[in-house]
Amino acid sequence: MNEFYAAAEAQRERLIAWRRDFHRHPELAYQEERTAGIVAAHLERLGYRIRRGVGKTGVVGVLEGSRSGPVVMVRFDMDALPIQEETGAEYASTVPGRMHACGHDGHVAMGMGMAELFARWRDRMSGTLKLIFQPAEEGGNGAEAMIRDGALDDPRPDIFLAAHLWNDRPVGSVDVTPGPVMAAAEKWTCVIRGLGGHGALPHQTVDPIVTAAHAVVALQTIVSRNVSPLETAVVTVGAIHGGDAFNVIPAQVELLGTIRTYEPSARDTAIRRLRDILQGVAATFGAQAEVDIAPLTPAVINDYQVTSAVRRAAEAVLGPERVTSGERTMGSEDAAFFMRQVPGCYFFVGAANPARGLVAPHHNPRFDFDEEAMVIGLAILAQAAAFYLL
């Protein structure tokens, strides 16, 4: 058995206990006080130099080796989601309306395990391990908040690593892909203003509902007719709000949606055409469209050299036959803010187990994962960091 797999395997029971404790006590974005407190106390006991309250509730732990060398930073996200759990697990959430439905409880447990392993190996280290326990990954841009609070300072990292337990893949498999792996995300809103009136007298109105309906259909042409077929994009309308009565044409309708892209050229095209279509369709029907497009996160783009090291680590832990390349998702991840400044690799650790019914997708009330994935993820992260530090 690989040395690092054996070291992670020895931590199995502790990983499971930590993970289940966090799962029972989920905390939403920027509210991770209990989780952060447990993490910080653990790091302090192990001799890490720590900072609390980074990005409001984040924790940074620094472990300096006995000799100089590179600084390897590893990120673990902590926040839960506003979802009522329906797993029926004995370790289910004790907080109504909140649950860990994306695996972040497992990520924190892996981070605590990694902290313990490298504390034992400190005398062997040539360099510094920097562990980042991040709040608010789920749409709160906690990475950006931590960067503003100096998470990338003292010391400045040379390498970035992060892993995600991934229910789109079976446990025992890992995907390590160079280049873009998660999409840039924009949030857009559009208020279509018309002229309200009686539902029986539509000729006296400028109907924003009809206008919105045509706009939604027209937006579908952005991906099919404007973005290059060799590039990837998603344009989604996620919500439509307008009207309160069956016999009243409202004065305005609000649309909410998102744009997801990998390539800057596709992003620019999608943003430009979304604005043109919404304003153009509105003008066609005599209405007006106020469009606001807010960037959320850039794309996660894996550095080729760091990704090569992570792939070697995964193959050393699992064997080449269980390591793939090519997993990409149009989901977004604010680790991209770290990776814009530090070369890194973000990889996916298979966590589904159909034989045990652990197949629910992320952000689903029945989401759960095979806890073996934590052992695998920890082993690969430790092996990858060891390439630089041991």
Image (cartoon, rainbow, N blue to C red):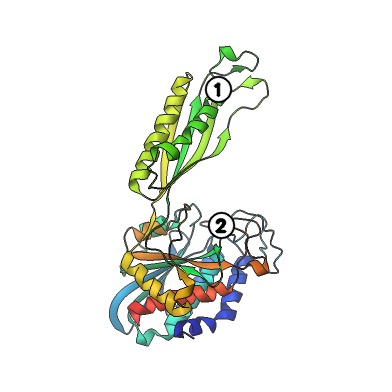
- Of mark 1 and mark 2, the one earlier in the sequence is 2
Residue 341: mark = none
Q: Is residue 324 visible?
A: yes
Is 157 on the left-hand or right-hand side of 21? Answer: left
User: Which numbered mark, 1 or 2, is in the foreground of this view?
Assistant: 1
In the image, residue 363 lies at what x, y percent? 59, 55
The residue carrying pointer 1 sits among few (fewer than 14), some (14 to 19) or many (20 or more) residues within 10 Å by Cα, namely some
Tag 2 secondary structure: loop
Is 198 drawn above or below residue 120 in the view shown? Answer: above
Residue 63 appears at what percent x and percent y? 38, 77
Spot occupied by residue 356 in the image (x, y as percentages of width and height):
67, 69
Q: Can residue 149 be seen by looking at this rendering?
A: no
Is label 1 in contact with label 2 (beta carbons under 8 Å)? no
Instruction: Name the residue rendered at 37%, 70% in the picture.
Output: 73
Tag 2: residue type?
Answer: Leu
Is residue 148 left or right of 327 when viewed as pictured?
left
In this image, 168 relative to 163: left or right?
Answer: right
Q: Which residue is drawn at the image coordinates 43% and 65% (left, top)?
A: 325
Q: Nearer the viewer, residue 1 or 299?
A: 1
Q: Which residue is mark 2?
A: 28
Q: Quadrant of residue 128?
A: bottom left
Q: CA distance from mark 1 to mark 2?
A: 36 Å
Report the number of numbered marks: 2
Residue, disc 1: 251
Quarter of the image with the C terminus is bottom left
Amino acid, disc 1: Ala
In the picture as drawn, the residue positioned furthest to the left comes out as 68
The residue that appears at 40% across and 64% down in the rendered structure is 177
Q: Compared to 236, does 120 lie above or below?
A: below
Mark 2 surroundings: few (<14), some (14-19) or many (≥20) residues within 10 A: many
